[in-house]
Amino acid sequence: MTAVIGWDIGGAHVKAARVVDGHVAVAEQVPCPLWLGLGQLPDAIAALAARLGPATRHAATMTGELADAFATRAEGVAHITAALVRTLAPAPVRIYAGEDGFIDPTAAEEAAMRVASANWHATARLAARAAGAGLLVDMGSTTTDLVPLAAGAVAAAGYTDAERLACGELVYTGLVRSALMALAERVPFAGAWVPLAAEYFATIADCHRLLGTLPEGADQMPTADGREKSATAARARLARMVGRDAAEAEADAWRDLAAFFAEAQLRRIEDAARLVLSRVRLPPEAPVLGAGCGRAVTRLLAARLGRPWQDFAALPGFAGAAPEAIDQCAPAAAVALLAADIPC
């Protein structure tokens, strides 16, 4: 039996997927907000490694180098790589560096600009190999990746975060952590256009919670006010965004406001998708490949684009693990499957 564990070290979560004999057997994530302290990272890695089981080797990608705990991305790459190597020893670890493939950990800091935030590329590379053509839309808790795939290859215009932000292939909005003040300047409420409080009173998770579009287990972060994750508490947080208390309006009014924010988020992603598709002319039958915890949103996006929707977790190699877990841990599953074909 050959077992490979793939790792995706983000700034808010650590995700891992275990591949056994070419198939994803299990995938899990745990919260690990690096901005609150780097000491928790080895513990998160060790906890997931114990839960997933033994592996002959490990493969890793990351976005956590962007956390403001690091002065530079290169420093972040070096720190995360060292934590992986120390915690997972004596099993070998390889680091994903985009088109350069997997590299030795000793070369990671020197290749930091290829290693940094390359998790999207691993997912897209695997999806392109399996699907041939399509638009990969991976909506996670914090960001959304939109990657065109053509002729079995990644057809992205950008590689770094800066390049991808500029060309619409990276949108800083996700299903959980996005602050509502980043999605709109004003909202329709009680018959008027109301300016929003420019304050971290609520997140988009509160809106998706009220709308019933927040998958179980997707929200692993504390709420904006530190209170419970209930509909009542979500309405209270949402009310603060318009300078009110929840008791000042009926529950339906707050649900309508939540729907407005969800629509604003979807429009932002749709605008980016149309920009990407205006550059890469995909055939009409090429699907939107939905990954991440925001699968329900990517389904809506596919309908607006007039394209079929396909679940990333339905691609070959994913039989065995729960589709929701694979989608939430797509880059971890991808690096594990890619590394399973490459001796470390």
Image (spheres, rainbow, N blue to C red):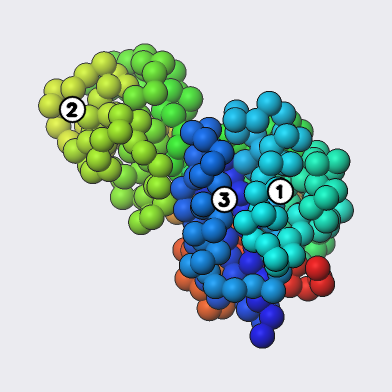
Q: Nearer the viewer, residue 287 or 82?
A: 82
Residue at figure coordinates x 36%, y 50% from the top left: 213
Residue type, mark 3 in image: Pro
The picture places residue 55, in percent across and down from the top left corner, at: 64, 72
Image quadrant where one finds the N terminus: bottom right
N-term mark: 1 or 3: 3
Residue 265 visible in image = no
**Label 2 to label 1, Cα distance in Å?**
46 Å
Q: Residues within 10 Å of mark 1 (few under 14, many from 20)?
A: many
**Label 1 to label 3, Cα distance in Å?**
11 Å
The picture places residue 24, in percent across and down from the top left corner, at: 59, 73
- Numbered disc in front, either 3 or 2: 3
Residue under label 1, please give it: 81
The picture places residue 121, in percent across and down from the top left corner, at: 73, 52
Q: Is residue 150 left or right of residue 315?
A: right
N-term mark: 3 or 2: 3
Residue 3 visible in image = yes
Residue under label 2, please give it: 246
> Where on the picture, by quarter, is residue 67?
top right
N-term mark: 2 or 1: 1
Image quadrant where one finds the C terminus: bottom right
**Label 3 to label 2, Cα distance in Å?**
41 Å
Callout 2: helix, strand or loop?
helix
Callout 3: helix, strand or loop?
helix
Q: Residues within 10 Å of mark 2 (few under 14, many from 20)?
A: some
Mark 1 touches mark 3? (CB < 8 Å): no
> Where on the picture, by quarter, is residue 114?
top right
The picture places residue 124, in percent across and down from the top left corner, at: 71, 56
Residue under label 3, please give it: 42
